[in-house]
């Protein structure tokens, strides 16, 4: 029989006398552990949800990997590259790539009778994955994008719609400036999206890739580049390495050099900002663990002092210091366990409530989302529970040595 465990169970189960001074200490320790764990679960869930939401929005506009003409990376101006069907097959066959799709960019101006606005027009083909746009659609229906003809459909953001007072079905002129002069095209507004990413919502529009190619004066098999979606964002660098080995520094049929980059390279400031959030998480985790450890240490010292007479009797009966120390450590484990139980119920409950109701709202102009995003990661929650338990018990080892300072003869007369 495990004597320390047995004694701790009897002490824990026998703590029903409200006159005992340790009762408030035990409650405070339990509440401290519960609050600390709940705050850690909510903090980690918010940061994970926020990082993944922003990451998915940025990737939704620019995909995970871009394959373009080397001159595009050098000059910043869209330069054509040949991405035909055979090239798409090569890109789709690369290990780690889930889907490859073409796109073509051009800049223009939308003009109404009362206002005008500069835009970035992105042409896409029938193979383009529209899942992201469909999830962020607020009005209208996405058209069937084509690469062989065009009816000049236009998908705009709610920001553009509000600025120019455009509605679904309205037709609007767009003007494009090139070396050949000014070109005017009349587009029909088919759908309106909203992502709350001001950087993109202010100017980003979609249409057929055939239309943008014609506006740029490119051949039908040319485009700005190809966007690659990967199977796992965690393996982005490994997948990009496979793309580099198979595609980079090769030539297309027009003798253009092909190169590639990841979304991390395209928008480094956004992802650097997201990485800074991890520092806040570590600070909060550290503070909450210190809180749990401090309240448990205080509670354990009070319990040891209250049980001085019992300690003296155990020593008189031959119990060693290590046995008595283990008894109180087991007692602390029971208190921590109860705190962890309540902490999980409160923390996970808050996360689930926010995920299902979105009760906590945010200003999308500042946070890029309209409600606080949360993501419940069960393995990470279990890891936080285990770390809290182990660290809390570890910091109690030193206070438990107070047992060795208690003298049996004097302690049995202790009141």
Image (cartoon, rainbow, N blue to C red):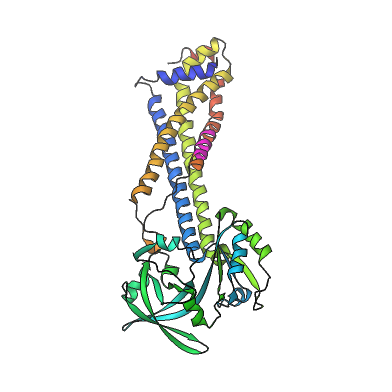
Q: Residue furthest bottom?
A: 181
Residue 358, how many percent across, how many down? 35, 51
Who's the residue at 43% across and 65% down the image? 197
Residue 167 falls left or right of residue 297 = left
Picture coordinates of residue 301 (x, y %)?
48, 27
Q: Is any atom of residue 406 visible in this view?
A: no
Q: Residue at x 52, y 71 (%)?
A: 103
Can residue 177 be found in the magenta stretch? no
Dividing the image into 4 quarters, which one contains the N terminus?
Answer: top right
Q: In the depicted view, which residue is nearer to us: 43 or 164?
A: 164
Residue 335 is drawn in which quadrant? Answer: top left
Q: Which residue is drawn at 48% across and 58% down?
A: 56
Where residue 169 sits: x, y (%)? Answer: 32, 74
Q: In this view, does 388 lie above or below 265?
A: above
Secondary structure predominantly adopted by residues drawn in magenta: helix
**Along the line of sight, the residue nearer the viewer: 268 or 289:** 268
Residue in the image at 52% along x and 52% along y: 278
Q: Residue furthest top?
A: 317
Q: Is residue 16 visible?
A: yes
Task: Judge from the rendering whether residue 167 lies leftward or rightward of residue 12; answer left or right.
Answer: left
Extent of the magenta region:
382-390
């Amino acid at each position: 029989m495990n004597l320390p465990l047995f004694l701790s169970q009897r002490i824990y189960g026998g703590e029903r006398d409200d006159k005992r001074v340790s009762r408030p200490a035990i409650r405070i320790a339990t509440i401290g552990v519960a609050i600390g764990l709940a705050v850690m679960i909510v903090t980690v869930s918010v940061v994970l949800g926020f990082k993944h939401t922003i990451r998915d929005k940025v990737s939704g506009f620019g995909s995970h990997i871009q394959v373009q003409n080397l001159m595009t990376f050098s000059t910043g101006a869209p330069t054509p590259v040949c991405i035909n069907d055979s090239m798409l097959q090569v890109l789709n066959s690369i290990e780690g790539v889930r889907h490859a799709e073409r796109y073509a960019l051009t800049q223009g101006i939308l003009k109404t009778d009362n206002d005008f606005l500069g835009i970035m027009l992105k042409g896409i083909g029938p193979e383009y994955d529209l899942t992201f746009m469909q999830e962020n659609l607020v009005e209208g229906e996405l058209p069937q994008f084509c690469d062989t003809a065009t009816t000049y459909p236009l998908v705009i953001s709610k920001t553009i719609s509000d600025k120019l007072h455009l509605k679904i079905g309205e037709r609007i002129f767009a003007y494009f400036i090139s070396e050949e002069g000014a070109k005017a095209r009349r587009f029909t507004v088919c759908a309106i999206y909203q992502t709350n990413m001001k950087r993109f919502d202010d100017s980003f529009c979609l249409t057929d890739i055939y239309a943008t190619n014609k506006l740029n004066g490119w051949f039908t098999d040319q485009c700005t580049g190809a966007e690659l979606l990967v199977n796992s964002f965690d393996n982005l660098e490994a997948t990009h390495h496979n793309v580099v080995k198979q595609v980079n520094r090769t030539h297309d049929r027009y003798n253009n050099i092909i190169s590639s980059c990841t979304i991390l390279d395209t928008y480094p400031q956004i992802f650097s900002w997201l990485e800074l959030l991890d520092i806040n998480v570590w600070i909060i985790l550290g503070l909450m663990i210190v809180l749990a450890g401090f309240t448990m240490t205080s509670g354990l010292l009070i319990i040891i002092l209250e049980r001085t007479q019992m300690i003296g009797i155990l020593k008189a009966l031959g119990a060693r210091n290590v046995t008595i120390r283990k008894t109180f450590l087991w007692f602390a484990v029971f208190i921590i366990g109860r705190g962890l139980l309540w902490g999980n119920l409160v923390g996970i409950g808050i996360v689930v409530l926010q995920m299902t109701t979105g009760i906590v709202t945010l200003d999308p102009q500042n946070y890029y989302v309209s409600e606080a995003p949360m993501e419940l990661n069960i393995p990470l929650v279990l890891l936080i529970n285990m770390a809290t338990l182990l660290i809390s018990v570890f910091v109690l080892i030193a206070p438990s040595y107070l047992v060795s300072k208690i003298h049996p003869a004097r302690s049995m007369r202790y009141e």
